[in-house]
Image: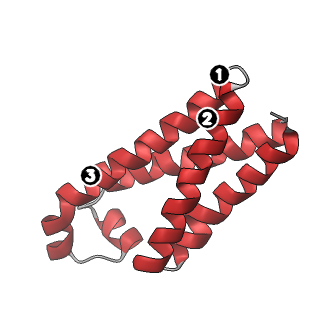
Amino acid sequence: MTLLAQILVGIVAALHLGFLLLEMFAWNTPRGRATFGTTREFAAQSAALAANQGLYNGFLAAGLLWSLIAADPVAFQASVFFLGCVIIAGLYGAKTVNTRIFFIQAVPAALALAAVLWSR
């Protein structure tokens, strides 16, 4: 992968580590509630679901980080697979939860995927 592709994959991985932290550990905090636009009551009721979602975001980040340290062809294959997963998750989240998710999650992953494919 080119340096640009690696940087973009790293940014997407960092975003998903941030999502993990917010959803697993800061969901019930004022910052977590402000980030996701939830009330104290909703955050308390949905904390287990948010933590589960955060764990999945951690798996996406782990896969992307793996793609940065693996050798080809695994690096290329892993980056394409995990970026594809992120794009699909972002599209689904934008459709079902909030359109901002498209720009926060799907667009960075699509840019990273384009860079990865271009570097091939």
Residue placed most toward the observer, 25 or 73: 73
- Residue 77 in the image, given as x and y percentages of width and height: 66, 35
Quadrant of the drawing holding the C terminus: top right
Which mark, residue 78? 2
Image check: 21 left or right of 44? Answer: right
Image check: 39 left or right of 74? Answer: left
**SS of the residue under disc 3:** helix
- The part of the image, by quadrant, that contains residue 111 is bottom right
Whole-Å distance between the Cαs marked 2 and 3? 25 Å
Image check: 47 left or right of 100? Answer: left
In primary-sequence order, the first of circles 1 and 3 is 3
When the figure is inspected, residue 44 is found, relative to residue 52, above or below; the finding is below
Whole-Å distance between the Cαs marked 1 and 3? 28 Å
Q: Dot 3, how many residues are within 10 Å of its Cα: few (below 14), some (14-19), or many (20+)?
A: some
Contact between labelled residues 3 and 1, with CB atoms less than 8 Å apart? no
Q: Which residue is mark 3?
A: 51
Q: Which residue is mark 1?
A: 70
The kind of residue on which mark 2 rests is Ala
